[in-house]
Image (cartoon, rainbow, N blue to C red):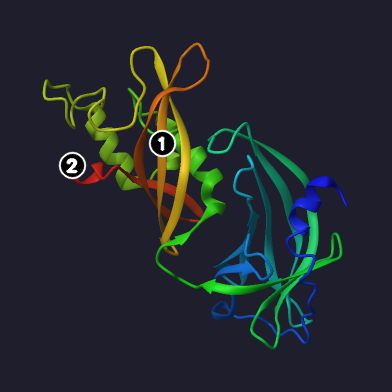
């Protein structure tokens, strides 16, 4: 076992449980969030997609600038379990905790395994790539206020498209259509002297860099309010365009997120949408 693997599996070494006779899980069985039983630091999120599930399993140890993920598509099988053969195991490494920029190191993309529900109603994940087995208990299905650490990398990506002194055309792929269209209309309006919605610099409305600086974002938290909506809290500091360390007091901002066609998009920034 590698050192990186030991970080994960030390949390479950005392939880080698067996599934018993698994049965074919339904949408009601699995949809939602599950936490690994022994330490609750590994979370599995099941999202139904037609007759399959998109599965995201993530592990993040507070204080470490690394996030470990598995993603796969689970499909029904004759064995009475959900199986997968496309498991992708990755490490997202940040220079320091809270950074939005990360490097993805994919260890493999051919993982195989299965999911089943045991007689206690727990989720059993059998990972045939390394022969391990983990047991999860349900934490919620559509619970309001559920922390969503698996969305940190996506929010970090979305932060790059927050309007600074201009609205980037490519931001259309990272925002809800109605929000982007409203922003595009506002940014195209003639600038005024009141410093509000039709001020093209947006210095009074949105997080932004100024005077030779760029915004430096950090993702502080992400909370799912329902299966298709979430709220992210980010802080922003300044960094010189030429580079260097971020400086200044962190400024707190909020991003509303919506899930569309399997992708999380920005649907509002600091509640500005109602003023567009």
Residue 109 visible to the viewer = no
Q: CA distance from mark 2 to mark 1?
A: 22 Å
262 left or right of 273 in image:
right
- Label 2 or label 1, whichever comes before in sequence order: 1
Q: Quadrant of residue 200?
A: top left
Q: Return the residue at label 2.
A: 275
Q: Is residue 202 above or below residue 32?
A: above
Q: Return the residue at label 1.
A: 235
Q: Nearer the viewer, residue 31 or 67?
A: 67
Q: Residue at x 26, y 40 (%)?
A: 182
Can you give x and y, in whole percent of width and height, for residue 134 in the image? 74, 69
Q: Nearer the viewer, mark 2 or mark 1?
A: 1
Q: Quadrant of residue 276?
A: top left
Q: Nearer the viewer, residue 272 or 98?
A: 98
Q: Quadrant of residue 119?
A: bottom right
Q: Residues within 10 Å of mark 2 (few under 14, many from 20)?
A: few
Can you give x and y, in whole percent of width and height, for residue 253 in the image? 34, 40
Q: Residue at x 84, y 60 (%)?
A: 129
Q: Residue at x 56, y 77 (%)?
A: 27
Q: Nearer the viewer, residue 4 or 86?
A: 4
Q: Is residue 61 above or below residue 9?
A: above
Q: Is residue 228 above or below residue 101?
A: below
Q: Is residue 114 above or below residue 174?
A: below
87 left or right of 237 in image:
right
Q: Nearer the viewer, residue 27 or 159?
A: 159
Secondary element under disc 1, as helix, strand or loop, is strand
Q: Are marks 2 and 1 in contact (CB under 8 Å)?
A: no
């Amino acid at each position: 076992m590698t050192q990186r693997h030991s970080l994960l599996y030390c949390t479950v070494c005392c939880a080698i449980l067996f599934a018993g006779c698994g049965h074919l899980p339904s949408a009601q069985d699995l949809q939602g969030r599950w936490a690994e039983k022994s330490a609750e630091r590994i979370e599995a999120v099941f999202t139904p997609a037609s007759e399959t599930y998109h599965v995201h399993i993530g592990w993040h140890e507070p204080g470490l600038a690394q996030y470990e993920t598995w993603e796969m598509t689970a499909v029904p099988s004759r064995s009475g379990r959900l199986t997968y053969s496309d498991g992708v195991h990755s490490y997202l490494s940040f220079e320091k905790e809270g950074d939005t920029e990360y490097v993805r190191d994919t260890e493999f993309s051919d993982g195989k395994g299965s999911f089943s529900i045991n007689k206690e109603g727990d989720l059993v994940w059998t990972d045939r790539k390394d022969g391990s087995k983990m047991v999860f208990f349900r934490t919620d299905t559509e619970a309001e206020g559920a922390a969503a650490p698996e969305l940190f990398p996506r929010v970090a990506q979305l932060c790059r498209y927050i309007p600074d002194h201009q609205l980037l055309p490519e931001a259309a792929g990272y925002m809800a259509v109605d929000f982007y269209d409203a922003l595009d209309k506002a940014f195209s309006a003639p600038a005024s002297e009141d410093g509000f919605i039709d001020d093209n610099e947006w210095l009074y409305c949105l997080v932004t860099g100024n005077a030779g600086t760029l915004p430096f974002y950090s993702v502080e938290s992400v909370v799912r309010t329902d299966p298709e909506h979430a709220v992210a809290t980010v802080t922003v500091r300044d960094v010189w365009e030429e580079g260097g360390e971020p400086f200044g007091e962190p400024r707190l901002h909020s991003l509303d997120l919506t899930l569309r066609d399997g992708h999380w998009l920005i649907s509002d920034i600091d509640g500005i949408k109602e003023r567009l």
